[in-house]
Image: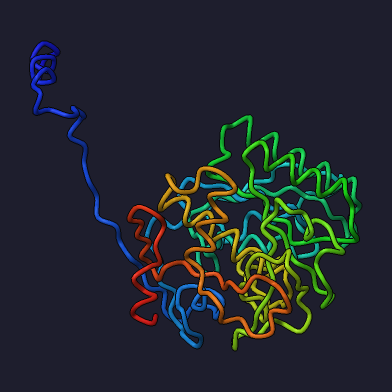
Amino acid sequence: MDGETLVQIGGDEAVEIIEPDGEISLMKHIVQHDASWGLADISHRVPNHTEYVYDSKAGEDTYAYVLDTGLLNTHEEFEDRAYLGHNVVGGVFADEVGHGTHVAGTIAGKTYGVAKKANVISVKIFADNKSYTSDLLEGIHWAVQDITTQNRQSKSVINISAGGELRESVNRAVEEAYKQGVLTVVAAGNYNQDARGYSPASAPSAITVGSVGRDHRRSRFSDWGELVDIFAPGEHITSAWIETDQDTMSLSGTSMATPHVSGLILYLKSLVPYRMNTPGDSLNVLRELATDGVVRDPQGAKNFLAFNGNGIVIFTGDLTRSPAYINGL
């Protein structure tokens, strides 16, 4: 159709809009049988399921910046989606501890990951289980700069499955990231204490994640308090490990709960990007979709349990709960 014809059609008062006749594709739901319990848990409202149900988009074209012990990027869980971004501490970039690889596997592993098509970018801030405030600050700064330079704010998340004593400088760095449109997801901590005493768990602009077990009781080690925004599975979580490119390991901690939420955010960003543009949008969507009031012994934390919609996320006007809630899934 030529331009003159389009102008004539557009001049008709019955025509409100003219746009290209684009292709529409079906959304495909996938069921992963015999999934790890954490994955199965976040795709059902009630515990003790064994299937992970998710949409085929699965975090496509999104990015997780993992500030941790490095990454075994050759592990088969990551296919060709894992990259070594920045090494703050020097020395070997590869993960010699395993923690960072495990966390990344829960975010984006093909078997153990929430967002199975997401990209992972490693920012190494630990050497031999040791890190300092200055290392964390440099890691945050590098990640934010890389995200903003490449205009990835709306499709990225920073995951920090680590923490220490309260440091205002760390909390301010998370706040500055937030102001630049970058979302940071952090572990509540494993001290069974109020998260307000630790950083970055106490950063108001972070999404702070506590841990639950299979029975949806707050893990005995998980920090608590009003600054904890959401809970996710964190006990006996199986994910990628570092001895070989096929190795796995089971670990427990809020470090393991946090990547479930980071992966969930990237998963949702690939499904409903128009509702996940800003860090505030992401938190609102998480809360609205979450299973409310089922965490036992939350100790003053917000009683939300991470949920992916059982493969279905529908928005009509204001954000509404997934139909899976009605079906008791």
In the displayed structure, 208 sits above or below 272; it is below
202 sits left or right of 17 in the view: right
Toward the top, the furthest residue is 4
Of residues 73 and 266, the one nearer the viewer is 266
Indicate the quadrant containing the C terminus: top left, top right, bottom left or bottom right.
bottom left
Of residues 151 and 242, the one nearer the viewer is 151
Residue at figure coordinates x 66%, y 76% from the top left: 234
222 sits left or right of 240 in the view: right
Residue at figure coordinates x 67%, y 43% from the top left: 178
Residue at figure coordinates x 60%, y 84% from the top left: 216
What percent of the width, then of the height, locates residue 306? 55, 69
Of residues 262 and 99, the one nearer the viewer is 262
Indicate the quadrant containing the N terminus: top left, top right, bottom left or bottom right.
top left
In the displayed structure, 247 sits above or below 266; it is below
What percent of the width, then of the height, locates residue 229? 66, 64
How many marks the image carries: the answer is 0
53 sits left or right of 252 in the view: left
What percent of the width, then of the height, locates residue 190? 80, 73
170 sits left or right of 312 in the view: right
What percent of the width, then of the height, locates residue 160? 73, 56
Report the colour scheme: rainbow
Residue 175, quarter of picture: top right
Of residues 229 and 159, the one nearer the viewer is 229
